[in-house]
Image (cartoon, grey):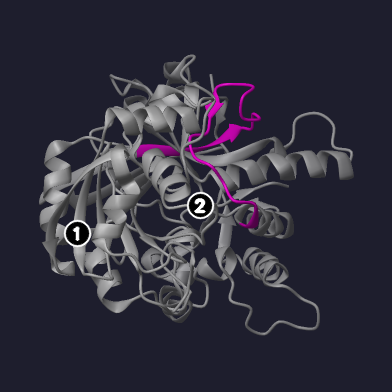
Amino acid sequence: MADIQAFRGWRYDLAKVGSLADVVAPPYDVIDARMQTDLYDRDPHNVIRLILNRGDDLLGEQTVYDRAAQLLKRWRRDDVLIEENVGTIYVYHQTFEHEGKPITRRGFIGRVRLEPFGSGTIYPHEQTHSAAREDRFKLMQACRANLSPIFGVYPDPENIAQEALESAVQDRTPLTAVDDLGVRHEMWMVTDPDAIAAAANALGSAPMYIADGHHRYETSCAIRDQRREAEQIEGEHAVDYTMMICISMDDPGMVVLPTHRLFRGVSSIGSADLIAKLGDAFDCENVGVGIERAESVWEVIAVEDRQSTLGFYCRQDDTWVLARLTDQGADDLAALAPEQSEEWRDLGVSILHKLVIQKLLGYAELPSPSYVHEIAEVVDGLSQGDSAGRDATGQVGSGQPFELACLVMPATLDHVKAISENGERMPAKSTYFYPKLLSGLVINSLE
């Protein structure tokens, strides 16, 4: 089982900062330049200055990571961030609307003992990128703290672990913040050792799957190894753990959104040429002209509810193409990726990237796409083009139009479980668990 423990977290002193909503932020990798500025302007103590410092007032060879670490020390010194008196588990709720219905997702924040992927009961499911790992390593190395939680999910059909903690906070008032998307975040502190032990015991031998935060988990492992060697650390130490929000896979608030692709770096292509290149691997049909047809194309894909149905937009002739994988296409993908499991090859994102982009269109390497989740974002992106600079998914825009886009079904929790346990990784951005977790609710010291 994953070793989950209470910890003495650092939290904002609301007597110093006022509103919690003014000092929290989304995860760093969904913050674009405009949001970064908005968060900077919102409050001088907003956690954005730690997780995504923009480098104001750097001195000499000082880096943004040094600047973040300096601010963290100052906030601790000035008691802007205060430390819990005792070990604590944090119950965490997110209330939001999805498809017109109010939903609450429940979880808890603890520290989890690090295990190298493949050697224990903590499993990854997505590929990571070296640049993002290096960025987070430098930040964690400088700050010596977990500034944002990793998102872990675990099987618990009866939600026993969560209920053990809920019973300890049912009569208490939570800390509350409403984010810019209207999501209500609530957090309670649990210090009762019996409730904490009951939750840990309820997990039994359950595995933990990383839903979001792969880069930070791998970074935590690297920091642990580096510091243990450099500082000759012996015995139990805070660096052996990382902060994680744990949510049952069976919680009714688990929502996975699709992650559609707006491709950068591809040549202009019309629908006829695309269909010709897809060849016998797909049954294709033109299904409409105009960017605004995105909604109706997505409705067809969603109703079919098959990973193997993809929707392409070709800017050259402003046309949408529905492409359904054939048996020949499935055989082609199996030949391209014989080392991958059938579950991996069944994923829409695997079909898209391995078979279509790399093989049939011949792009061995491309810049990261713009990743969007709502159809309105697809329409806006195709209409306005690729804005230069960092976008809301952490990618760098080209300033050019998008010549090609693809609508793709989301991977499910069953996919996450099966592929993780196969020891495989999905292509990057295969899942988008909504809503995102807040940074700044609590910080875990690695000292």
> Which residue is rendered at x = 49% and y = 21% of the image?
421
Point out which mark residue 442 bears.
2
In the image, which disc is placed on residue 320?
A: 1
Instruction: For marks 2 and 1, give the CA distance.
Output: 45 Å
Q: Look at the numbered discs 2 and 1 and tell me whether their residues touch, using CB distance below 8 Å.
A: no
Q: Residue at x 42, y 67 (%)?
A: 267
Q: Residue furthest top?
A: 205
Q: Is residue 54 above or below residue 179?
A: below
Q: Nearer the viewer, residue 144 or 273?
A: 273
Disc 2 element: loop
The quadrant where residue 253 appears: top left
Total marks drawn?
A: 2
Identified at 56% across, 63% down, the residue is 51
Residue 117: in sight, yes or no? yes
Toward the viewer: 66 or 79?
Answer: 66
Helix, strand or loop at label 1? It is strand
Q: Residue 119, image x and y in percent?
A: 64, 22
Q: Is residue 81 above or below residue 223?
A: below
> Dot 2, crowdedness within 10 Å: few (<14), some or many (≥20)?
many
The answer to whether residue 117 is magenta is: yes
Q: Which mark's residue is nearer the viewer, 2 or 1?
A: 1
Question: Residue 269 got which mark?
Answer: none
Position of 366 relative to 356 (above/below): below
Q: Residue at x 75, y 30 (%)?
A: 236
- Could you say where residue 280 lies in the image, as x and y percent from the top left? 29, 38
Give residue 242's quadrant in the image.
Answer: top right
- In-front residue for pair 202/405: 405
Kind of residue sitting beneath label 2: Val
Amino acid type, residue under disc 1 in the picture? Trp
Q: Earlier in the sequence, mark 2 or mark 1?
A: 1
| Highlighted range, magenta | 107-131
